[in-house]
Image: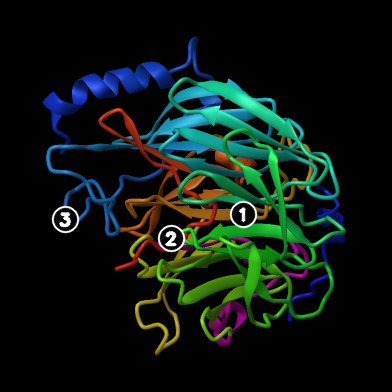
């Protein structure tokens, strides 16, 4: 069994339609491209050619629905402390923008609202005061406002209507609260929810009715995933108990399954959301992947569910890999491992130019069309058809905070409401 106390020192650190799309694409690129030469160190590295999609040649399963004759353009925003990099991910990736942001005190989370074309970036202290939140307009390239709080910040989520942000006080906080914030101006509403000790990661359901709160909980006792009703901000359910403190987790679109990583465990657990019971525990060491005696407190600090909910990706820090599981048989049968993908660079490093919590733990994000899987703290972009690394985004080697922004005919069409890559099957 993994030693869950082994890294206390890390815990203290802190084909497009050309006629229709040409004008909108030129307008969009003019908004994104920054002035001056681009340093070579931030340009994408081409490792292999991606595989064509069996359906369209450009995107794999789980693609966002489009109106006939319209096209979607995909961008990946990457956020090292104090910086922002924007990559055009269509065809061969290219860096189209980089700029400074007032977030050098440490980025903790990023979410967005497509209707208002805003990104929200949390930064500052992750516990007991000193937290800050920034609103950024992706169309005008303007910081709209920043707010400072008497509480901390961490990895938050926003309701689908773009009205409210649920902000955890931080994994090192002494209180157990998630604070409700007005997204329009960043001011607290006065409401808060008790989600457990060490408020850390957050997921809001696609229908906006529930907020899932992952408590880091520094103790070594089993912990629960707490669910609250966003209409009343009252707790409605506990899921678990899990092996230890909750780390990155995802849910499916129908809110029937939760996939959860925990402190000190190489692997993940699957829970039935409605009953609250654990269905399966997948131990990677029993699948032939050895754990190591040193490293992050969560060796599987990264989990992502493909948009079509057929695949689950999980980080394996000790072995510098990501493992892909077929989850189409759930809940009746357990996840089935189908691929092991080695990183092009090692995750065994510290992030540079980092304010705190600089150990490269990792994070995973599926693109909304299902074509790519991004690996934070390594920079790899994995082709999900070929199951191989095809690109590397250098700034993503030094951060695990990233988010997709899509445009459809020059209108912001998609930004995730959650930093975690949840499922999108609701029908």
Magenta segment boundaries in residue numbering? 277-306
* Residue 300 belongs to magenta span: yes
Query: Is the residue 342 above or below the residue 258 in the image?
Result: above
Which image quarter is the N terminus in? bottom right
Residue ID for mark 3: 55
**Residue at (63, 35) in percent of width and height:** 80
Give left or right: position of 125 versus 116. Answer: right
Q: Secondary structure at mark 2?
A: loop
Residues at marks 2 and 1, CA–CA distance in whole angstroms: 28 Å
**Residue at (45, 77) in percent of width and height:** 256
Is residue 313 visible to the viewer in this orientation of the structure?
A: yes
Nearest-to-viewer mark from 2 and 3: 2
Q: Quadrant of residue 236?
A: bottom right
Query: Is the residue 216 above or below the residue 401 in the image?
Result: below
In the foreground, 84 or 254: 254
Query: Is the residue 272 above or below the residue 425 in the image?
Result: below
Residue 384 place in picture, x, y as percent? 35, 57
Residue 215 place in picture, x, y as percent? 72, 66
Residues at marks 1 and 3, CA–CA distance in whole angstroms: 31 Å
Residue ID for mark 2: 207
Q: Which of the two labelled residues, at mark 2 and mark 3, occupies the earlier sequence position?
A: 3
Residue ID for mark 1: 362
Q: Is the residue under label 1 in contact with that under label 2 (CB below 8 Å)?
A: no
Badge 1 crowding class, 10 Å Cα cut-off, few under 14, some 14 to 19, many 20 or more, is: many
Badge 2 crowding class, 10 Å Cα cut-off, few under 14, some 14 to 19, many 20 or more, is: few
* Residue 5 belongs to magenta span: no
In the foreground, 215 or 354: 215
**Residue at (37, 16) in percent of width and height:** 30
């Amino acid at each position: 069994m993994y030693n869950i106390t082994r890294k206390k020192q890390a815990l203290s650190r802190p084909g497009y339609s050309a006629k229709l799309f040409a004008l909108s694409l030129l307008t969009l690129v003019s908004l994104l491209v920054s002035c001056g030469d681009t340093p070579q160190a931030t340009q994408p590295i081409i490792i292999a050619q991606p595989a064509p999609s069996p359906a369209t040649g450009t995107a794999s399963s789980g693609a966002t629905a489009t109106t006939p004759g319209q096209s979607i353009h995909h961008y990946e925003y990457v956020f090292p402390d104090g910086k922002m990099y924007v990559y055009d991910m269509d065809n061969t990736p290219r860096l189209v923008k980089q700029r400074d942001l007032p977030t050098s005190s440490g980025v903790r989370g990023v979410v967005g609202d497509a209707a208002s074309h805003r990104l929200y970036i949390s930064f500052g202290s992750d516990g007991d005061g000193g937290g800050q939140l920034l609103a950024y307009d992706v169309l005008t390239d303007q910081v709209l406002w920043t707010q400072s709080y008497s509480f901390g910040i961490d990895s938050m989520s926003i309701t689908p209507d773009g009205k409210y942000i649920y902000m955890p006080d931080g994994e090192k906080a002494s209180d157990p609260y998630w604070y409700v914030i007005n997204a329009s101006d960043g001011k607290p509403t006065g409401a808060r929810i008790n989600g457990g000790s060490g408020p850390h990661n957050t997921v809001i359901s696609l229908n906006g009715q529930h907020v899932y709160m992952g408590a880091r909980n520094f103790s070594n006792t089993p912990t629960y995933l707490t669910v609250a009703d966003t209409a009343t901000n009252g707790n409605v359910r506990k899921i678990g108990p899990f092996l230890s403190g909750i780390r990155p987790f995802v849910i499916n679109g129908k809110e029937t399954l939760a996939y959860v990583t925990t402190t000190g465990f190489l692997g993940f657990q699957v829970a039935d959301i409605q009953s609250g019971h654990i269905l399966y525990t997948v131990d990677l060491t029993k699948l032939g992947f050895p754990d190591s005696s040193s490293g992050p407190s969560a060796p599987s600090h990264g989990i992502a569910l493909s948009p079509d909910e057929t695949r689950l990706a999980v980080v394996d820090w000790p072995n510098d890999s990501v493992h892909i599981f077929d989850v189409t048989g759930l809940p009746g049968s357990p996840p089935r491992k189908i691929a092991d993908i080695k990183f092009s660079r090692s995750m065994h490093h510290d992030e540079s130019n980092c304010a705190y919590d600089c150990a490269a733990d990792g994070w995973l994000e599926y693109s909304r069309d299902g074509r790519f899987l991004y690996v934070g703290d390594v920079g790899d972009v994995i082709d999900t058809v070929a199951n191989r690394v095809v690109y590397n985004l250098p700034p993503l080697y030094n951060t695990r905070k990233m988010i997709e922004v899509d445009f459809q005919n020059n209108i912001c069409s998609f930004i995730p409401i959650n930093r975690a890559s949840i499922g999108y099957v609701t029908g």
